[in-house]
Image (tube, rainbow, N blue to C red):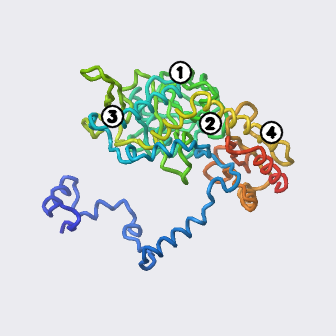
Amino acid sequence: MPFQSHYIPNTQQEQAEMLATLGLSSIDELFLDIPQEHRNPSLDLPPPMSELEIQRELGGLAARNRPLGSGPSFLGAGSYHHFIPAIVKALMTRGEFLTAYTPYQPEASQGTLQVIYEFQTLVSNLYGMEVANAGMYDGATSLAEGALMACRVTRRSQVAVSDTVSPACVEVIRTYCQPQGIAVDLVRHWDPQVTSQTACLVAQYPNFYGSIEDIAGLARLAHGQEALLVLSADPTAMGLLQSPGHYDADIVTGEGQPLGIPPSFGGPYLGLFTCKQQYIRQMPSRLVGRTVDRLGRTGYVLTLQTREQHIRRERATSNICTNEALFALAATIYLAALGKQGLKQVAELCYHKAHYAAARIAELPGYSLPFQRGAFFQEFVAQCPAPPAEINRRLLERNILGGLDLSGPVYRPLLPPAVDKGMLLCVTEMNTRADIDALVAALGELG
């Protein structure tokens, strides 16, 4: 008997027809891939509560969190504590922006369309690229979409990913590529293997461990095999470093969270996506352009929408159906408020403070810097004399949030054998000299 529910408006006959088309005899067959013990789990839910009781319950849970700003923080690894000017929240929470819908009707959406246009312009300038889209979900999905786009451009089905790319991003790339039969190979950063079958070489700038790699060399290596160079670039670092476009990168993505968006326990965030003009037809998401009406007045419209909502599904470049428009607005306000010199100042503070912290930590007995022999930005790896988890626990007792423990199964296989107690530390403009000195003093005592 076909499944029937008051909440599903399909008749039994329609359900039977759909099952027949799929070659199935029952609804249960749709869920055979899910182990039986996980299909209808028993939920251990508490008894019903009143609104007042729920507020107290949730308030108690929230009070267990350690908000940023309550003490020094040196945790980064993809989510960063930067200063957010008050103007960002003041403008982005205006009713005109909070209530605006997606800009399908230009006659009713000029404000939203202009914001996206300005956002695209700023991101293009930031990365030194020719075109940017209206934004993506987050940095990891942007990078994965970049890898897929490279496969479409080159008509190849192998992706080489440097082992210095964030492991979380690598997993998202694998998730995106696996259903499409695209092979993802993790290559060593000191000798990345790129062949005539490789669609793209994926790297991070600066890399996950904070080091600044030879991006120009990676571009030459990829282009030598007619592959593309796909980068994930920290937007804050672009205030100080040469842009990816300067090094002839083909597709540049990034996590927009540092641009006026709070860490928020991991999201929601903002994906950045740029590419060369010649590849624009393969770019996911949508693009806003500027034009004039018949009276010569400036107007903004959606000019490119290669997504399955608007074109034939089989011709769509991506199934991404929206963009983080409110956070694109936040990033636009942030960049406009800081300007070129302001962003440069933030980047310089991050760079110099991180180098100061690294130099102080390297002087401590038992500590060393296994990677950072040259330039690095904002983050660095410290080899510790004791397990990082234990050090972090004891730092937290002093109200100091330490770095990312790299000794676990996710990161350990990617590191040299000598780095068995690695900790990834991050220093931004939010860390004062007193904060850094307190960290160094604590590490010295704990080591």
* Residue occupied by mark 3: 110
In this rendering, the answer to whether 93 lies above or below 30 is above
- For mark 1, give the secondary structure: loop
The CA distance from mark 2 to mark 1 is 18 Å
**Side of 397 where 246 appears, left or right:** left
In this rendering, the answer to whether 83 lies above or below 288 is below
* Residue occupied by mark 2: 207
Residue 344 in the image: state x and y as whole percent: 63, 30
Front: mark 4 or 1? 4
Whether residue 86 can be seen here: yes
* Residue occupied by mark 4: 359
Whether residue 406 can be seen here: no
Going 71% across and 57% down the picture, which residue do you hit?
Answer: 389
**Could you say which quadrant of the image residue 352 lies in?**
top right
Sooner in the amino-acid sequence: mark 2 or mark 1: 2
The CA distance from mark 3 to mark 1 is 34 Å
* Residues at marks 3 and 4 touching, judged by CB atoms closer than 8 Å: no
The amino acid marked with disc number 4 is Ala
Sooner in the amino-acid sequence: mark 4 or mark 1: 1
